[in-house]
Amino acid sequence: MELDHLILIASISFKLIIAFLILNFTGSRFAEAAHLGNDTDKLALLDIKSHLTDYPVDGFSTWNDSLNFCQWKGVKCSNRRQRVIRLTLKRMNLYGNLSPSIGNLSFLQALDLSENFLDGFIPPEIGRLTRLKNLNLSFNSLAGGIPGNLSACYNLVNVSLDHNFLKQQIPWEEIDVSFNDMEGEIPGTIGSLAKLTLLYLALNQFSGILPPAIYNLSSLKQLALTENDFRGNLRMDIGAVFPNIQYLWLSTNIFIGQIPASLSNASSLLSLDLSSNYFTGNIPSTLGYLQNLNFLNFGYNLLGNHTDDDLLFLSSLANCSSLQVLDISMNQFGGKLTSSIANLSSQLNLLNVYGNSISGSIPEEIADLVGLTTLMLAKNLFTGNIPTSIGTLPKLKCLYLAENHLTGEIPSSLGNLDKPLKLFLFNNSLEGSLPSPFSNLKRLLDA
């Protein structure tokens, strides 16, 4: 037992020695890494000072080896790592230019060199400061352009470059901050991003009206503001001021007013989503000029007036030969679907008019839309029989006819739809028994 006890003690002692050596080694490595990082910051600060041609001596009297660089005037370091996180040299009568070494302050979160006499260019190395949140170089004599890689500073919140001699346009072409928790209003300064082609602000908590300056972004091709709290009217000339727009996604906001007819001027428009807002009035018939349009969603608004001419715009969409999705669900559309529905694109795969006040019979010609996979006519005021021609739609997988005033028997031709089919017919006045061809259907729901 004593021998076993001694062996156990020896084993524990050996493990403790190994653990001590490992901790001592890794600790020294961490200390060495921290020391190297601190040296990098110190050298960067000294190089920044060396690029100044004139400065008040008392302003940099603390910048010497008698003090740790974290105690130098204008410098703030993090408590744990002792790395520079803030450099504030505002209004210090500094002359000279910005050192490229600024990019070596890799933990920097705020840089304020405003109200000095700095000249030269903004060094591109500033784009390496990925932790940077606030940048203020205003009221200097900086020239040239803004580094394109400044967009790599993805934590940047506030940028002030005003009152300089910067001439080149801001080079950013794409901004995507979607799927975040950003809030507040879009700043009017966004209008200075003249080269911007893509602006994604979707799925945030932005609010307020769109600033007039946003309509200065004439190069925009994609604008996504989906799922925010933007409000107010769209500018009536939106299609003219965004002549290059291809994707305009404004759904799930609080926009009001009429849909601008000028959208027809945006001849490159491919996808238009204005769903889940509070738009009123009629859909402009001029949208038929958008021959490249493939996606059109006006669902969940207050469009239409429960009148016979609410659906007149549909005939104009015959010119949109690439249209694949047409959704006008949950609005106030009255009127009837006429035989002209057959003139819509043969590529149309979803037609959704659910939740309106559309009346009359379902036209037989709807079967000419041979690309349909989903036909949603439910919750309207349709009357008459279900057209037998629907059974000839070769790609149909979902047929929603529930909550109407349809009568007669379920046509046996629907049994020809031998693909998995979702069929909703409840809350109608249909009669008779289910035709035998329905036994061929792989799935039948709520018939």
Image (cartoon, rainbow, N blue to C red):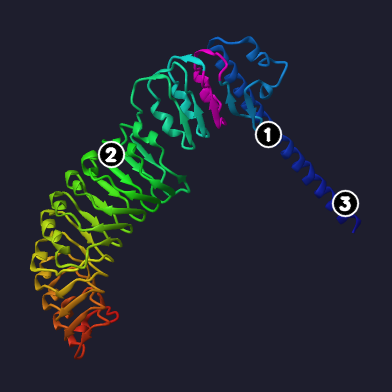
User: Relative to 305, does residue 429 appear above or below in the rendering?
Assistant: below
Real-space CA distance between mark 1 and mark 3, rounded to the nearest whole angstrom: 46 Å
| Boundaries of the magenta span | 91-115
From the image, tell me which residue sits under label 1: 79
Where residue 436 appears, as percent x and y from the top left, is 18, 88
Q: Mark 1: few, some, or many residues within 10 Å (few <14, many ≥20)? A: few
| Side of 101 where 164 appears, left or right | left
The quadrant in which residue 404 appears is: bottom left
| Side of 130 where 220 appears, left or right | left
Verify whether residue 47 appears in magenta.
no
Which badge, 2 or 1, comes first in the chain's sequence? 1
The residue under the point 18% across, 51% down is 293
Where disc 3 sits, the SS reads helix
Where residue 64 appears, as percent x and y from the top left, is 68, 14
The three-letter amino acid code for the residue at tag 1 is: Asn
The three-letter amino acid code for the residue at tag 3 is: Leu
From the image, tell me which residue sits under label 2: 220
Where disc 1 sits, the SS reads loop
Real-space CA distance between mark 2 and mark 3, rounded to the nearest whole angstrom: 78 Å
Where residue 61 appears, as percent x and y from the top left, is 67, 13
From the image, tell me which residue sits under label 3: 6
Which badge, 1 or 3, comes first in the chain's sequence? 3
The residue under the point 74% across, 36% down is 24
User: Relative to 133, does residue 203 appear above or below in the rendering?
Assistant: below
The residue under the point 36% across, 40% down is 211
